[in-house]
Structure formats: structure tokens, C-alpha cells
Image: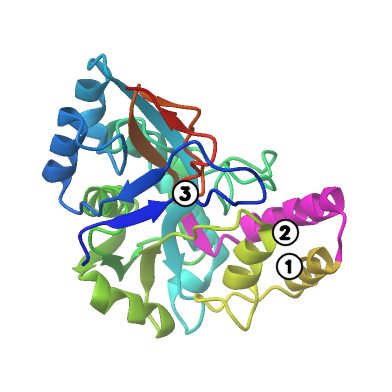
Amino acid sequence: KGERLVMEANREYWGGAPKLKQVIYYPIAEDTTRMAAVRTGEVDIAYGILPEEIAGLKVMPQLEVFSVLSNDCVGVIAYLEGDKPRIKSKVRKAMLMAIDREKIVSKILQGVGAVARSVVSAALPFFNPNLTPYPYDPKQAKALLTEAGYPDGFSSNLVVPSGFYPKDAEITQAVAAYLKQIGINLEVRLVEQSSAWPLRRVPYEFFYSGGAVMNMDGDMAFSRDYMPETSREKYNNPEVTRLIKAARASSKQDQRRELYRQVQAAIWEDMPRIQIHDVGDVWAMSKRVKNWQPRPDKTIVLKDASVEG
């Protein structure tokens, strides 16, 4: 119990019987144990490969390594109620432009994932690729902070659910260091996950979190995070709400996609979240596995997969 999940093929499945007779899932939480299982061939497919392990696995002739952009985008959520600097859009834009997100992805994440270019991951089918970019520009960030009424900066705190997102401690410490350069003193509070998640529902200053869209559909992404009755950060833009409801009422996918692109443009302008990076997932697979590819939603579909040898 709790050590593995054994699944037997349904030979009567209406869509045709799968090629594999049995699939066994092993939960291996410890990184070193999981890496050992990959290297020894104990497992055929593994998820959660650390960036620093990629190079070593790629030289192993029996393995194939995949880096896939996931359905999650991670950043700093600002609580938008109260008389605090964080409630001003210019402050949040200043924070975004003060952070060298390219360096975070290339150095800390070692190239796994991508710089966030919207409020949702670029892996999603309704992603808007045409939003205004916010490049790393500390001078412009400082100017925006001054325009917002905080020429000397301010102090705040950032709650981080420890160990939930890739390199979260390293990334948030880097974020704090970048913000310090424009006068924002951000205290990073690493909190155990069980203690951190309830804090999303109570007033906080800033919270480090993502928004995985498990069904890959815009209604989940935007109804969950950007409607006034469900938004964790208390975001409320009537035009965004109208567009989300219009997309929900449509059965035409092209129309829904266009509405969701408009939603992203409006939210991106408001900047309720300082989005850092789209999460990259790294998988390792034995080359004896055929007809299988990892997906952005992490769903493991093995209906057509087979194993040689």
C-alpha cells in the first residue's frame, strides 16, 4: 500500500485494447532515489528530472530526455486590497521590469522553461503571443516606481511554499535581490507547503504561486484566477469578467480563443501578478519505450505505447 499502483489493460476497451498489458506507477519523491531508478533502468519513464541532471542523462545511450513547456506559469501574486504600494499597477510593472527573468531561466533553471510572456503559459492553445513585452530595465523600473509615488521604494514580504515549484528558494531570493536595486526590500518567507497554501485565502503582501491549467482550457485558467468571486488576489476588472463570461457562453473555439486573447491583454495591462517563468517539465524515458511523448498537462497516455525487449 502506497508503494505502487498497478494497472491492468482493459482488453474490452471500445477504442481498442492497449498494447501494454500492465503499467506500474511508482511514487518516488526523493530526487536521488528517482535518479538512481532512471539510471539503472528500474523505471522506463520518469518525471521531475532536475535541470542539473539533464547533461548526465543525455549521454546515456539507453535514455532519451525531454524538456517540455508545461501548462503552468509561476510568479509573484500581489494581494490587491488595502492601502499598500502593491495595489498600484505601476508598482507591479516596475517590479517586473526590475527582475532579470532571462537570467533566472538561463542560470537558475538552466534553460528549462521560458520567460513568462503572458499571465498563462505559452504551452496553452489560447496563449496570446502578441502582448507588450516588459524587458529587464532597472532604470525604467525605478522611474515607474517614482511615478507611482514611491521614489524611495518600500518594504514588504513574499510568502513562498517551500519546495513546490522548481528552484523556488533560489528564484525568490534572486527576485528579492533584483528588487532591492530599485529600493524595494522584500523579505522572503519560505513556508512549509501545508502551512503556506491556507495563506492564499487570507490577506498577504505577496505570494509566490502558479496556475496550472489541468484541462488546457481558458475557462479554468481565467474563471479560477481572475473573476472577482474566485480571485485569490482580489482582482476585479469588469471588462475581463465580461470577456470571460462571453467565452464561456460560446461553443465556437476560434471565437473563444480570440476572447481569451483579449482577456490576457487586459490582465497583462493591469499586471495583478508579476509573472516570472513558464514551468518546464523534464522527463527521462528508456529508448525501449515506443510511441510515447510527454504532454504539457503531465497526463501520461499509454494507450498506443509499447515496450521492446
Graded by Cα atoms within 10 Å as few (under 14), some (14 to 19) or many (20 or more), the crowding at tag 2 reads many
Residue located at (46% from left, 75% from top): 79
Quadrant of the image for the N terminus? Answer: bottom left
Residue located at (48% from left, 62% from top): 91
Find the magenta span and give its range: 250-274
Q: Is residue 254 magenta?
A: yes
Q: CA distance from mark 3 to mark 2?
A: 42 Å
- Would you name the residue on which mark 3 appears? 9
Amino acid type indicated by mark 2: Val
Q: Is residue 252 magenta?
A: yes
Could you tell whether 21 is left or right of 31 in the image?
A: right
Amino acid type indicated by mark 1: Val
Check residue 263 in the rendering and tell me which mark sits there, or answer none: 2
Q: Is residue 19 above or below residue 127?
A: above
* In this view, the mark in front (1 or 3): 3
- Would you name the residue on which mark 1 appears? 240
Check residue 166 in the rendering and tell me which mark sits there, or answer none: none
Could you tell whether 65 is left or right of 194 in the image?
A: right
Graded by Cα atoms within 10 Å as few (under 14), some (14 to 19) or many (20 or more), the crowding at tag 3 reads some
* Circles 2 and 1 in contact, beta carbons < 8 Å: yes
Q: Position of residue 204 (x, y in %)?
A: 37, 79
Amino acid type indicated by mark 3: Ala
First in sequence: mark 2 or mark 1? 1
Q: Residue 230 versus residue 6: which sits nearer the camera?
A: 6
Q: Position of residue 162 (x, y in %)?
A: 23, 62
